[in-house]
Image (tube, grey):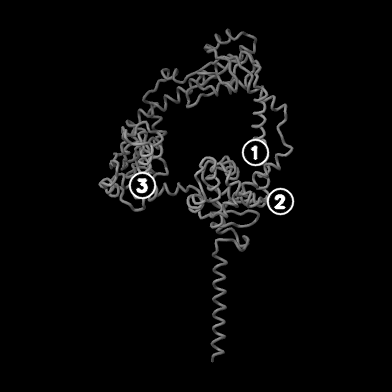
Amino acid sequence: MLSHFLKAKTFVLFVLILLFAGLAYFSSDFDFRQGKLGDANCVVRVYGKCYRQKETDRLSQFFWVANDLLWIDFSRSLFDEARQDRDTTNFVMSLIILRREAEKLGIHPTDEEAKQAIRTSPLFQFQTWIDDDVLKNRILGPRGLGMADLVQLAKDYLCWQRMHDLLEAGNQPVAIEIDKTYLRDNQQYQASLIEFNRSDFVDKVKIDDAAIQKYYDENKETLLSDEKRAFQYARFTPPAETAEMTNEQKARQRLDYDRKVNVIYADLSEEGADFAAVAGKHVADKGNAFKIELKETGLFAEVSPPEDLAKKDELLGDLFSAAMAPLPGRSVTVPVKEEDGSYRIFKLTRVRKPEPLSLEAAKEQIKKALTARESNRLVTEAANDAQAKLTEALESGKPIADAVKAAGVTLKPLTPFSKSEPPKETPNADLVVAAALETAPKAVSPAKPKPLGEGYLMVYVDGIVLVESKDEDARKDSLKLSASGDYRRAIFNAWFARRKAESGAQRMGPIGADDLKSGDEEGNKEAETPAES
């Protein structure tokens, strides 16, 4: 009987072991199967290996820590300098490839070298008060990393630097290229400016009711009212400073004030907190040494804010950003500091989405659009026509005075300038320099559009001279240094792009993306009800 029981027990244990092993094998966040069962759950695949969410999430944290250490060139190089979002997928794939290539090249930084790189990172140069506790608790800890991870990141950084050094060896800018660049940057232009302002053509535009009706019929789906939002906000006024207070007392009072504001912010932004009730509790707290007010705004559009928000474009941009929505974690701003030292914390309470406009309501908006379109057409035609006439006259050998008269334009003489010293007190000076750089002497440049649709400009170059400078050698040395950096970056990027192609790196999905799109859609759905309630 006992023998039978022991055999049964052994069998049950064996089955349980197989069951748990199978669960671990098939549900683990790590790829023990080397991607042999397909791409389900893969976030990236590099060198044929599947990396799952837990692995990629951890590697993505290295990007943010590198930024915290101000190793910006390193993080952006692996992230992809052209990207403007927060999706770290490219960084993760590049980091995996960087480590593989460092191993192949025999680049193995020591722990001591890595620690020295950390100590000499830009962060420690600017923030000398940072110590190991700050690193652990404020930089690494919140991202689930430890000091060993930081050392590994520093080794990655050193590998990246040494790869640059290896590739740069024997690849230096050619001296003749430095001379050409110096000549281009320092030759002096004697030139004149020709301008075509769109505002000069506005009065020539005639808009009738038929044109307005036609525009409305063609664009009624996009003719919408401005989105409007309403907010509650708590305002904190700093305590007054008296003449009897020492500088140390004033500094301590400001520090206590800032700390208290942050404590209140934590209460106001807590998930599920009733903003008005929490703020009211702090308003009634006699222990606060400063004034707290709770206020509300009505619904308003970004272009027509209440008086106390007027001309605060950056703040308004934040209040009306897509990231702000009546959802947990996205409806309360961080403390916003004012010029007088006061703070405001805003809570988004209502949103009124844009609504279709009637013809009457849209009439002024349509007039502005049609006027802008027609005046832009007129100024473009005038600039192109003048450029063609000037070019034809100058190429036929006529003097500039006759060419200008034939084209019906006015020349505005400019002070002599170069690329390194643009014309002083001239609007759009960079655009003027760019036009001059591509124009031969005794010729006129193509028409260059001014920013914001303001019109066009052209440059007539009368002559080009090289002015001798006592700083020529120093300037050439500076150009050589700059060119070396450009060569270094370009060579590495080209080499690394080939290594990435060889790795077969594939993205299956984003890592650490903003994920605002789905959040905004949810926010919009929830915002419509309180907007009209």
Q: Quadrant of residue 478?
A: top right
Q: Which mark is residue 457?
A: none
Of the residues under marks 2 and 1, which one precedes in the sequence? Answer: 2
Mark 2, residue position:
106
Q: Which mark is residue 489?
A: 1
Task: Tell me, yes or no, whether the two marked residues, 2 and 1, touch with CB atoms within 8 Å.
Answer: no
Asked which secondary structure carries label 2, the reply is loop
Amino acid type at circle 1 is Arg
Residue 520 located left or right of residue 72: left
Give the distance between the C-alpha atoms of the residues marked 3 and 1, in whole angstroms: 43 Å
**Mark 2 vs mark 1: in front:** 2
Looking at the image, is mark 3 or mark 1 nearer the viewer?
3
Measure how far apart labels 2 and 1 are at the Cα level.
Answer: 21 Å
Query: Mark 3 or mark 2: which comes first in sequence?
Result: 2
Instruction: Kindly indicate the quadrant of the structure image that contains residue 388.
Output: top right
Q: Earlier in the sequence, mark 3 or mark 1?
A: 3
User: Is residue 457 visible from the viewing direction of this image?
Assistant: yes
Identity of the residue drawn at 55% across and 84% down: 8
Q: Residues within 10 Å of mark 2 (few under 14, many from 20)?
A: few
Identify the secondary structure beneath mark 1: helix
Which label sits on residue 265?
3
The residue at 60%/57% (across/down) is 50
The x, y position of residue 505, in whole percent, is 63, 51
| Badge 3 element | helix
Tag 3 and tag 1, C-beta contact below 8 Å:
no
62 lies left or right of 176: left
Tell me the quadrant of the picture where the N terminus can be found.
bottom right
The image shows residue 1, relative to residue 341, as above or below, that is below
Q: Amino acid at mark 2?
A: Gly
Give the image location of residue 331, x and y in percent. Answer: 37, 46
